[in-house]
Amino acid sequence: MTWVRYSLPAAAIVSSASPAYAVRYLSIEEAQKEAFPSATHFSEVQTGRVWKAEAGGKAVGFFVFDRVVGKHLFIDYAVALTPSGAVHKVEILEYRESYGGEIRSPSWLAQFVGKTSASALKINGDIRNIAGATLSSTHVTEGVKRILGAYGSRVR
């Protein structure tokens, strides 16, 4: 049992030396209200993934939750679409990597606004890369493109 006497302090040091980096910025409900402040009701179209935002009985847009892998860990994000299927807003809900959180920058996320399923959505093309967050920015961009392909032309 002498191994316990020596390994237990080492285990305590290792576990306290690896901090948790997950940062939850917004819940789904908070992001929905930020994306569509005029909406009075959100009805689930696809369980836990897609909601229709409504105001006065009319659709004001669609809200899609998704998750991609950054470099090693998941990034939760949401894409708000206009009734015509263009990107209205992209928001990072939770970021778990230890670096690369710059993808939450409003100026970087604003690049997606107005993009449609016909847009290229390519890093170093119409979406600029973020040094130090190359994989995160690439994977979020690919995720937005996938959402536009799946929902952008069908939301009307």
Image (cartoon, helix red, strand yellow):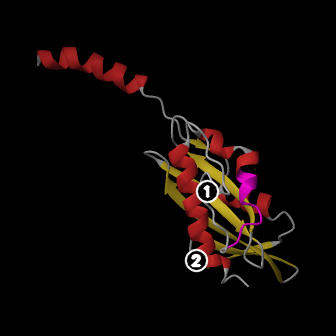
Residue where numbered disc 2 is placed = 150
Residue where numbered disc 1 is placed = 77
The picture places residue 123, in percent across and down from the top left corner, at 59, 54
Residue at 59% x, 48% y is 94
Q: Give the magenta-colored segment's residue range.
A: 109-116
Q: Does 98 sit above or below residue 123? A: above
Q: Name the element at disc 2.
A: helix
Q: Amino acid at mark 1?
A: Tyr
Taking the image as drawn, is residue 4 in sight? yes
Q: Quadrant of residue 40?
A: bottom right
Q: Name the element at disc 1.
A: strand
Q: Nearer the viewer, residue 6 or 32?
A: 32
Count of labels in the image: 2
Quadrant containing the N terminus in the rendered view: top left
Seen in the image, is 136 located left or right of residue 45?
left
Task: Tell us which disc is closer to us: 1 or 2.
Answer: 2
The picture places residue 148, in percent across and down from the top left corner, at 63, 72
Quadrant containing the C terminus in the rendered view: bottom right
Residue at 78% x, 78% y is 83
Q: Nearer the viewer, residue 5 or 155?
A: 155
Q: Nearer the viewer, residue 101 or 118?
A: 118
Q: Quadrant of residue 72?
A: top left
Residue at 61% x, 40% y is 101
Query: How far apart are labels 1 and 2 at the CA level?
Result: 16 Å
Q: Amino acid at mark 2?
A: Ala
Residue 9's tag is: none
Earlier in the chain: of badge 1 and badge 2, it is 1
The picture places residue 133, in percent across and down from the top left corner, at 56, 41
